[in-house]
Image (tube, coloured by chain):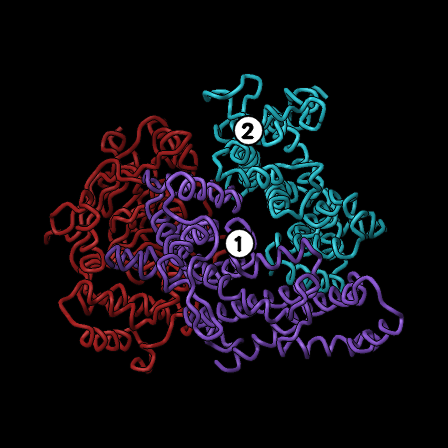
Amino acid sequence: MSEPLLEVRNLRVEFPTRRGTLVAIDDVSFSISPGEVLGVVGESGAGKSMTGAAIIGLLEPPGRIAKGQILLNGKRIDNLRYEQMRRIRGREIGAIFQDPLTTLNPLYTVGRQLAETMTTHLPIGPAEAKKRAIEWLELVGIPAAAQRIDSYPHEFSGGMRQRVVIALALCAEPKLIVADEPTTALDVSIQAQVIALLKTLAREKGTAMMLVTHDMGVIAETADRVAVMYAGRIAEIGPVREVVKHANHPYSAGLMGSIPPLDRRVERLAQIDGAMPRLSAIPQGCAYNPRCPQVFGKCRALRPDLLDAGTTRAACWLFDTEVARG
Amino acid sequence: MAAAVKRFFDSDLWFSFTRSPVTVVSAIVAAVCILGAVFAPWIAPHNPFDLASLNLSDAFKPPAWTEEGAREYALGTDDQGRDVLSAIMYGARVSLLVGVSATVFATLLGVSLGLLAGYVGGALDSLLMRICDIQLTFPSILVALLVDGVVRAALPREVHAEIALFVVIFAIGISEWPKFARTVRGSTLVERNKEYVQAARVIGVSRARIMVSHVLPNVLGPVLVVATLNLGLAILSEATLSFLGVGVPPTQPSLGTLIRIGNDFLFSGEWWITIFPGIALIMMVLSVNLLGDWLRDALNPKLR
Amino acid sequence: MFAFIISRILQALPVLLSVALISFAMFAYVGDPVAIMLGQDYTQAQRDALVADLGLDKPFWVQFATFIGNAVQGEFGLSYRLSRPVADLIAERAPATLELAFTAAILALAVGVPMGVYTGLYRHSWLSRFFLTFSLIGVSLPTFLIGILLILVFAVSLGWLPSFGRGDTVRLGWWTTGFLTWSGVKALVLPAITLGLFQLTLIMRLVRAEMMEVLRTDYIKFARARGLPNRAVHFGHALKNTMVPVITIVGLQLGAIIAFAIVTETVFQWPGMGLLFIQSVGAADIPVMSAYLLLIALVFVTINLIVDLLYYAVDPRLRIGRGKGGH
């Protein structure tokens, strides 16, 4: 297997508050190979978006990386100074945010926003930047790009704006994109177009992607591998086919069970009882144990690491060799 | 009663109060200023208006800690031998009286008109809000000056001198009602559509009754904040008017009047006559403003 | 663009007319102008003649129309106190007030905006804390006390700067300026600081609040995520967005400066319109008061118009016709 592009090792993100420290992300490890698309799914508050923010080095204070490492091309980036990290953002790691209506500066034309991103990172002048900005708008499917270059964000529709955001994330040709819920704020009819665009562009440019979403359909369609997060931890990680069709972790299984299948009619969709615990009240042992249908003694006492579950890796005592034997 | 007291000390408001040292200090300063002002006739070391006790040979005594200072005049004396400290206490009384009365007046006027505008709506609402808009275009001190000037012109001199204090209160109150009206109108528009008002309307409670006993209590929170912040402003407006020589009558000098009188002696070196009333004014206004800031933040659910 | 200006002017007209109405009502009904103009002894015939001359026997609306017609031509009658045309009095005093207000406004903007940006960006630095404390005092200090304190320190104790008057002025046509002489500039320093300080602290606090608000937005986060340098993020993206709300308030504040000049001019015996106005209030000189009121209203309306135009220049969203908001 090739050298991973991004490696996250034992990442722990904490939020100091007046009522003690909250652990938002706990001991999360994964890697992304060049050109690979890793989907990250989970409920709101599971720590998906925060993992993305930690990778691009823009955790909201007072949140901070308390433990662990983030490596890009084998070099640590979690401990860089602001200025060093700034040179990586946009150039090495691009980002796409959730709501295209708020991610673009309303007072600058899209052309200017594209051009300033490129001139910041690439050794090109303003004329070249403008030329490339038009090319990028064409590439993301904006009609009459040469005229639209001087338009302001409010003159575009939501779907068009997200295309502009994608162009902005890709224009300095980063090797990795962190896309945080890129379609959630869009109309359902536009979601598929934007995802298709993202997928095509990533493949053409050989860009790897961390795709954070709670939409399993998007994951199934786009990702190569998928990580399921629950209460700040990874519950299961593995190839997308395996996780979607044959999830090993009871939580992933429950999550997949809640997707309506298209090929047959079901009376009722499966649902998971209860709610994800708040960060201030994560239970001892496996965080999922109060809701887990297959819970047993060990789950309430000890926290499982990611264990080999055959096709995937799952943080569940069901796959502990000793338990299996006994 | 005891239960109410206990509930107050258990409340979030009291908690946030004790957590902010600045607020506690402001409260203490404000309390000292207010008590000193209210009880001036009983606790002031001298009576500056008792002509019999004035002695011109005591004029222009510097504060007690300087070489020529006299012990009995802690903050020195003015040109007529009046004790500056006592004059400040009596002056603060007038300042506070005008400030509080003007704020109460502005509150009553603003709350009633705001409530009417918000609840009745329609043409009355548009008219009142247009008046607010136009008045808010001008700084309140300018409005107060104009009202004062017009009343001065409309009344014969003797009548004006007699009711000058009320004219100032009226002028300042008039200059500040739109803020209250706006606040109350906004909250009323929100409350009007809530279910308890609808319910009251359905069971046939009269309009006036709904406004006064249902809507009013629910819009008073923001009014309290605006009133506290406004009190500091009203005291400043009074001081400014009196400093300009068109405020309270010279027979009842306020802090602003004292500063104006003292200002004439600034160049001859008798700085204490104007600076000490100035410091008293600043302490009073600053402490009230800080309390208002705290109240606003404490009552604002968004910031909690 | 042209339609925009026209619509704004049309919106401003009712304000101006209402103020004119108040002005006129003061002029016509407060006190007895006829008695004041005629002095102690007069016959009924003299009185009737003057009433007819002034048009006071005509219906209200006719009088109001005449008043407006005169006002447009700068004709406000005679001052009761000085027995001179009000227009002349104001024209004499206007340059002093305008120069003072202009200097104070520039001072407030040139110092207040950078301080606000700094305190918004570096919220926890000790310098920010110092600025904030300073601004709290600035907001609570009444203008006249600031003036008195400045006089005490810089004029009485140190003797560096004059404490009253405009110094030597130079005549340029009907305008007199203090900018061109050393003594005129020196005389301007303390009054300008006094007048500008409150606005300065207000602008600083406002810019700071807006800056903090803008820095939390997604587009600023996205600008950082694109790796733009801090300079571009802070002074390009953030500051420009901060300016949109700041322009409005600052515009209103500049109007307030002209009004607050009344106090400053009194403290420094500055021979401007404010001093004229306060002397008129004291003497119940209605013609001067109503003329001043109208003039101030005109200044406010003009400033509002300029603010709207600036808005238009800064915010592209306003340039699109309504109803086309492209979501």
Closer to the camera in the image, C4 or A98: C4
Residue C253 lies left or right of residue B135; in this view the side is left
Residue farthest along the right direction in this orientation: C44
Q: Colour of chain C?
A: purple
In the image, the chain rendered in red is A
A122 in relation to A39, above or below: below
| Picture residue at 65% right of the left edge, 55% below the top | B143
Q: Amino acid at mark 2?
A: Phe
Q: Give the quadrant of residue A107.
A: bottom left
Instruction: Give the quadrant of the N terminus of chain B.
Output: top right
Closer to the camera in the image, C162 or C9: C162
- Residue C55: percent from the left, percent from the top? 79, 77
Label ID, residue C265: 1
Q: Chain of mark 1?
A: C
Residue receiving disc 2: B60
| Picture residue at 70% right of the left edge, 24% below the top | B41
Q: Chain of mark 2?
A: B
A124 in relation to B118, above or below: below
Q: Amino acid at mark 1?
A: Glu
| Picture residue at 23% right of the left edge, 57% below the top | C229
Q: Colour of chain B?
A: cyan
The residue carrying pointer 2 sits among few (fewer than 14), some (14 to 19) or many (20 or more) residues within 10 Å by Cα, namely many
Closer to the camera in the image, B304 or B295: B295
The residue carrying pointer 1 sits among few (fewer than 14), some (14 to 19) or many (20 or more) residues within 10 Å by Cα, namely many
- Residue C283: percent from the left, percent from the top? 69, 55
Closer to the camera in the image, C108 or C211: C108
- Residue C288: percent from the left, percent from the top? 65, 64
Q: Give the quadrant of residue B243.
A: top right
| Callout in the foreground (2, 1) | 2
Residue A117 lies left or right of residue B123; in this view the side is left
